[in-house]
Amino acid sequence: MTFDEQIMKFVSRHERKAFYEKELFREAARLLSRMDRCPVSLSRGCLDREYWAWVTKDYANMDMQRGVAILAYLHSTEFPDNGYFHQKALIDWISYGVSFWIERQNPDGGI
């Protein structure tokens, strides 16, 4: 069954929301594995693993920082089996991600 077919079988808004929350939780570990979470690293908070871990490029792909919004949702939203809800370590990692983003933003808003 394709992803779209799975979504279409849910009729109510509540069922769709529960489905997406389950998917977000399922993918959270993968997202966190892409983040430099070392508190003393110069690239801490970066979600571009090719940049900070493998050093295969000179600058980070800032589009990947969008994952911080997913982490913030998981931290702030209580739903069944959400082990990330109000987890202290997660709020630190979210802060790292936002800081990494802000530090690289130009005064005109560009990156």
Image: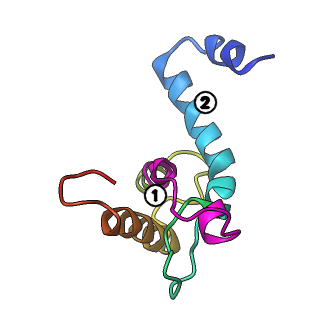
Residue at the spot 44% in from the left edge and 65% down from the top edge: 97
* Callout 1 crowding tier (Cα within 10 Å): few <14, some 14–19, many ≥20: many
Residue at the spot 46% in from the left edge and 58% down from the top edge: 75
Q: Which mark is residue 83?
A: none
The Cα–Cα distance between marks 2 and 1, rounded to whole angstroms, is 17 Å
108 up-or-down from 94: above or below = above
Residue 31 belongs to the span the image colors magenta: no
Q: Which mark is residue 19?
A: 2
Query: Looking at the image, which residue sits at the far front?
Result: 58
Q: Position of residue 78 (x, y in %)?
A: 47, 50
Q: Which residues are magenta?
A: 50-71
Residue at the spot 32% in from the left edge and 69% down from the top edge: 103
Q: Which mark is residue 75?
A: 1
In front here: 85 or 106? 106
Three-letter code for the amino acid on which mark 1 is drawn? His
Does residue 65 appear to the left or right of 30 in the view shown?
A: left
Q: Quadrant of residue 47?
A: bottom right
